Image (cartoon, rainbow, N blue to C red):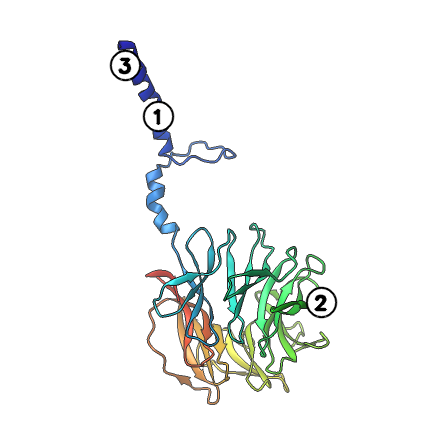
Amino acid sequence: MRQAILLVAAAIFAVAPLCAQDREIRPAENLVVDSIAKIPMVLAETAGRYGAYRAAWLADWHPERREMLISTRFGDTPQLHLVKAPEGARQQLTFFADPVGGGRFHPNGGDYIVFQKDIGGGEWFQLYRYDMKTGDVVLLTDGKSRNLMGPWSSGGDQMAYMSTRRTGKDTDIWVMNPADPKTDHLLMQFEGGGWIPLDWSPDDKKILVKEALSINETYLWLVDTATGEKTALTPRDGVAKIAYGAGKFSKDGKAIYVTTDRESEFHRLSYIDLATEQPKYLTTHIQWDVDAFDLTRDGKRIAFVTNEEGVSVLHVMDVATHTEMAVPQLPTGVLGSVRWHRNGRELGFTLTNAHGPGDC
């Protein structure tokens, strides 16, 4: 009997150190740890709520209904969710081990979504089509190259995107109708990276393309969608380095709106006439950078965001008069993903501040 008690006591003392070790963070076997204090598991569990926060980012508006497509994380990776009403429940659409990098509704009816997804963390992004009725997912690109989603055409039946498919390193512009992947074709070959399609002209005959050499030096081009020929739109004299940001065609197709630091310390919202190629600066009265903007589908209003000492300020301008319109007072924070609904009345965006990591 005494021997049995001693055996039980020995077993208890043998297990106790193991339990204590399990309450500490153990470094991986490939790490050599020297003179590093042990980290209690309870500390990691307490700190976890500060590192495992969840943000919601606006991906797109439904083209016909008052519904939002958002990106948020409920597991280990961000996925696409549909929200059908203000403060409504989120319906998860995609369920992948890899993160889904945003998505855009088909502009003509919203019957499917095109989204971008990584494979295995290697940043070899692929484009996919998600059917809203069936939930079926179809791979649109080759599954090997690196592909980045671009803008929809004005007619809503084509999408421009960037791909390294041709050489594995050069970023070319390709075009396809996502409803029919067989229409996929190379539009324009480029050397190197940094080429980004920004917008289609209203008649879909041109694509506005940005060539980014650095954060301080970029150039704008017009690419013919029938021939693939490109025409320089901004000066390249080598005298001054000019940066351009977001860009969109005007509703009549005679000009483009773009953010630029041309002739200024700040990025200003500008209107460039395509006939004269001369800019007209619309926000000279604001001595802050314009970070982002969006134009309504009817071309009557522009919403833009300025960065004022690290805080975002929303502005809405009437295109005809270039006068600002009154906007509601918003909570202090940083705005992103600014996007008009097709109805031209409602503006969606993501707001991040001290009270939340990101809400739509």
Residue 2 placement, left or right of 97: left
Tell me where residue 347 appears, x and y as whole percent.
42, 76
Give the residue type at disc 2: Gln
Vertical side of 308 occupied by 27: above or below: above
Give the residue type at disc 3: Ile
Give the CA distance from mark 2 to mark 3: 81 Å
Quick one: SS at disc 2?
loop
Of marks 2 and 3, the one in the foreground: 3
Quick one: SS at disc 3?
helix
Quick one: SS at disc 1?
helix
Vertical side of 307 occupied by 56: above or below: above
Q: Which residue is labeled 3 in the image?
A: 5
Of marks 1 and 3, the one in the foreground: 3
Q: Which mark is residue 154?
A: none
Closest to the observer, 189 or 15: 15
Q: Is residue 289 visible?
A: no
Q: Residues within 10 Å of mark 2 (few under 14, many from 20)?
A: some
Q: Which residue is labeled 1 in the image?
A: 17
Give the residue type at disc 1: Pro
Q: Which mark is residue 189?
A: 2
Give the CA distance from mark 2 to mark 1: 64 Å
**Most distant residue in the front direction:** 134
Tell me where residue 162 appears, x and y as whole percent.
63, 65
Q: Residue at x 34, y 29 (%)?
A: 20
Q: Is residue 125 visible?
A: yes
Q: Residues within 10 Å of mark 3 (few under 14, many from 20)?
A: few
**Mark 3 and mark 2 in contact (Cβ < 8 Å)?**
no
